[in-house]
């Protein structure tokens, strides 16, 4: 598919919408409480921004639509396992969701000994750890090997900009982050969602390696799945066909390589200290294509870019006009 690279949504700043909150990738607005929604509703607009190294690197055309529609696919295919925050989709880049009180624990489910961050099981395993997150892993495991069973590796949720810290289930309950009943429910739902995700991914020739879930409580204390689910930004996918050979040779399994921009930046500067050079147009175009390919591989559906409206922002504004307060 030849994508129109001029159709980009770098931001969705809409002054007529109330109570704005602008994140690294999403631009959000909070609608006031009502009889049907005592905690209110949140408008979440997925922009095309791509974030890494605690900064915005570029805007990737169609990325916001891909992520919104991928999450929609999974929300609709997992609602029987866990209720979610979704109310409606007024635009391809927008979800209207129930406002929830986000639980202060980040839930990451892992099916493989993989990862590169300091909190990943592979990093800790290679440093000699065998006991982590309340689990004991066997000796003799190799990089990217399947774990004996999927495990939850929870971390504290650093709302104040601090660093997430690994937690065990006992610590979560003892510190009062969640009640025992909440932890039991969240962990059971997370494992069920991951099992469904792995099964459906396998049918598409993919391996769902690990993923992040965010849960929150509504006004009754009911636990809902929020944010996103099984998107290329919240999950790691490998291509099943190439995994066995990569594992045998110790190579990195083939995946949707969204790291191309990160690698390009790291090769040219220290992104935590230096100004980031302008990302070349051809790299932005390739990354856009990767997101579209990921959507089609994950969902089995053709990606249909929404070309309506003079610009993507004009389209979003028109589709959200019913919520304007000024």
Image (tube, grey):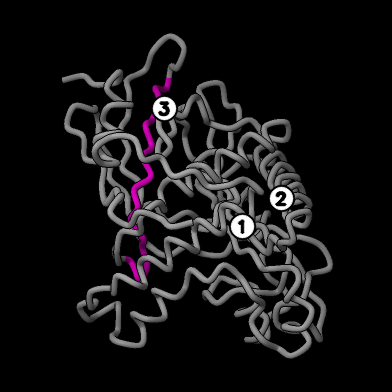
Closer to the N terminus: mark 3 or mark 2? 3
Where disc 3 sits, the SS reads: strand
Give coordinates of residue 26: x percent, y percent: 35, 46
Q: Residues within 10 Å of mark 2 (few under 14, many from 20)?
A: many
Q: Residues within 10 Å of mark 3 (few under 14, many from 20)?
A: some
Give coordinates of residue 60: x percent, y percent: 35, 59
* Residue 48 included in the magenta stretch of the image: yes
Q: Name the residue under label 3.
A: 90
Closer to the N terminus: mark 1 or mark 3? 3
Indicate which disc residue 197 carries: 2
Q: Tell me where the magenta segment starts and ends, as one range.
A: 39-54
Residue at (30, 84) in percent of width and height: 270
Residue at (70, 74) in percent of width and height: 113
- Name above or below for residue 49 compared with residue 90: below
Check the image and name the residue furthest to the bottom.
249
Whole-number angstrom distance, CA of label 1 to CA of label 3 = 27 Å
Picture quarter with the C terminus: top left
- Name above or below for residue 104 compared with residue 238: above
Could you say which is closer to the camera, residue 144 or residue 153?
144
Q: Mark 1 points at which residue?
A: 211
Could you say which is closer to the camera, residue 17 or residue 127?
17
Whole-number angstrom distance, CA of label 3 to CA of label 2 = 26 Å
Residue at (79, 78) in percent of width and height: 244
Mark yes or no: residue 176 visible.
no
């Amino acid at each position: 598919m030849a994508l129109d690279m001029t159709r980009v949504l770098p931001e969705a700043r809409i002054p007529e919408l109330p109570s704005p909150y602008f994140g690294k990738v999403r631009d959000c607005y909070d609608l006031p409480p009502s009889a049907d929604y005592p905690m209110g509703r949140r408008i979440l607009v997925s922009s095309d921004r791509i974030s890494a190294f605690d900064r915005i690197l570029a805007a990737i055309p169609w990325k916001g639509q891909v992520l919104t529609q991928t999450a929609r696919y999974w929300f609709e295919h997992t609602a029987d396992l866990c209720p979610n925050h979704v109310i409606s989709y007024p635009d391809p880049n927008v979800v209207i969701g129930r406002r929830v009180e986000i639980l202060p624990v980040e839930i990451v489910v892992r099916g493989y000994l993989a990862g590169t961050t300091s909190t990943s099981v592979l990093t800790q395993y290679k440093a000699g750890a065998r006991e982590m997150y309340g689990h004991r892993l066997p000796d003799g495991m190799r990089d990217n090997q399947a774990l004996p069973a999927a495990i939850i590796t929870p971390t504290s949720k650093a709302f104040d900009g601090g660093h997430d810290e690994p937690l065990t289930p006992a610590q979560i309950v003892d510190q009062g982050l969640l009640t025992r009943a909440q932890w039991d429910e969240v962990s059971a739902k997370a494992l069920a969602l991951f099992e469904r995700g792995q099964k459906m991914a396998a049918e598409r020739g993919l391996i769902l390696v690990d993923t992040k879930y965010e849960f929150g409580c509504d006004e009754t204390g009911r636990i809902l799945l929020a944010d996103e689910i099984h998107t290329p930004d919240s999950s790691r996918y490998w291509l099943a066909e190439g995994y066995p050979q990569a594992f045998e040779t110790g190579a990195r399994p083939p995946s949707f390589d969204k790291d191309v921009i990160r690698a390009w930046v790291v090769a040219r500067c220290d992104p935590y200290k230096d100004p980031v050079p302008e990302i070349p147009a051809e790299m932005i175009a390739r990354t856009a294509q990767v997101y579209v390919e990921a959507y089609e591989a994950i969902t089995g559906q053709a990606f249909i870019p929404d070309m309506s409206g003079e610009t993507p922002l004009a389209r979003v504004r028109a589709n959200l006009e019913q919520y304007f307060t000024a």
